[in-house]
Image (tube, rainbow, N blue to C red):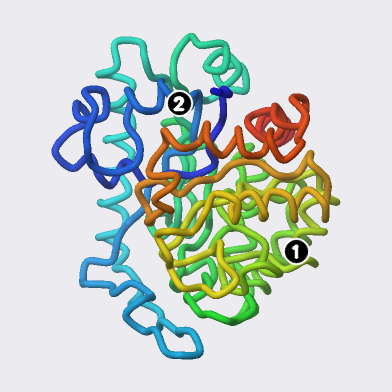
Amino acid sequence: MSYKFIDGHNDTLLRLDKGVDEFFEGSKQGHLDWPRAKKSGFAAGFFAVFCPNPSTDPTPVVYATPKGYEKPFPPKLDDSYAYQYTNKMIARFLQLEKKSGGRFKTARTLKDVESALEGEYMAGILHIEGAEGIDEDFDALHVYYEAGLRSIGPVWSRENRFGEGVPYRFPHSPDTGPGLTEVGKKLVKECNKLGIMIDLSHLNEKGFWDVAKISNAPLVATHSNAHSICPVTRNLTDRQLDAIGKSNGVVGVTYSINPDMISADGKNNEKTPLSEIASHVQYIADRIGVDHVALGSDFDGTRVPQELKDVTGVPRLMSLLKNDGWSEADLDKISHKNWLRVLGDTW
């Protein structure tokens, strides 16, 4: 069973350091490429531009204790490095369209995404995850918008000039530090003016509420789950979920097990069943309505359960939801219609 779907987050650009040809040719590495995506119903997705830490950044598993873990922040990024790396990743994204022979298109309008769902091509939504490459005057933001930027997460799980992300902690609430800086608040307003979606995944709780107060757009977390099920800092509390629902926003449920954002015990278990991902979909829908839950894999930015494996496992997840009693109308909302609504309201 294959549904056309929009995916809220991938880090596939990081994997294409030898060129984008591998994306179209197919690969046994990673989670996402053209052949596997086409087979699975992947019609459009948010392709993240992310600047990794130049020095080694151990995974949360390294800090595991019998009670959980608490991973410290990596260092702040150097501005010059962040700007250069951001440009490199955006150039790599644009190469996907240039070398696709019409198979891939940068989504700048809602119509671009709708056409992808009709099968004309795959649509890539250019997203920045952690805005270190953007200056305080927002000159780079406006240039990136013209290049196709339509979604931005002000922070990743570290500090920058705009605010703080959540450090990886389990068990712990997302209330881990101060809210947005003054320039961070200005960034939200500037994105509202341009029609760039604000992504709340990775932002700490005080920053979340700052965005909720300032923004005139729907609240969105592209790859986050329910904190009530899995109490890791990256997941959303019931109160945060309620705010997203009231704003007519959406949560993209993630498949991440590193950090483990699915399981109640946070144990990073590769044998985590698909039913535990489905439980987050069900919980969020029960809490704030089926109009406010979607898919947000985090492919190529994390490990995923063996049962899912890669993008080819998404149809299995959708089949599981169908077998659990979800209607075709609701599955259409989860797979793509909720994302379409939020993008239309925002762009």
In-image side of 102 versus 290 (left or right) = left
Query: Residue at image x 48%, y 9%?
Result: 120
Quadrant of the rendered structure where residue 33 is? top left
Q: Is residue 8 left or right of residue 39?
A: right
Q: Picture coordinates of residue 193 (x, y %)? A: 66, 41
Q: Is residue 38 visible?
A: yes
Residue under circle 1? 240
Q: Amino acid at mark 1?
A: Gln
Left or right, 300 with respect to 174, comes to left
Marks 2 and 1, how far apart at CA: 31 Å
Q: Are marks 2 and 1 in contact (CB under 8 Å)?
A: no
Dot 2: element: helix
**Mark 1 burial class by Cα count in 10 Å: few <14, some 14-19, many 20+:** some
In percent of width and height, residue 131 lies at: 45, 56
| Residue wearing tag 2 | 40
Q: Is residue 66 above or below residue 159?
A: below
Quarter of the rendering occupied by the N terminus:
top right
User: Badge 2: few (under 14), some or many (20 or more) residues near its Cα, within 10 Å?
Assistant: many
Asked if residue 37 is positioned above or below residue 230 in the image, the reply reads: above
Tell me residue 214's x, y (percent). Answer: 75, 58
Report helix, strand or loop for mark 1: helix
Q: Residue furthest left?
A: 18
Numbered mark located on residue 128 in the image? none
Residue at (45, 37) in percent of width and height: 313
Residue 279, quarter of the rendered image: bottom right
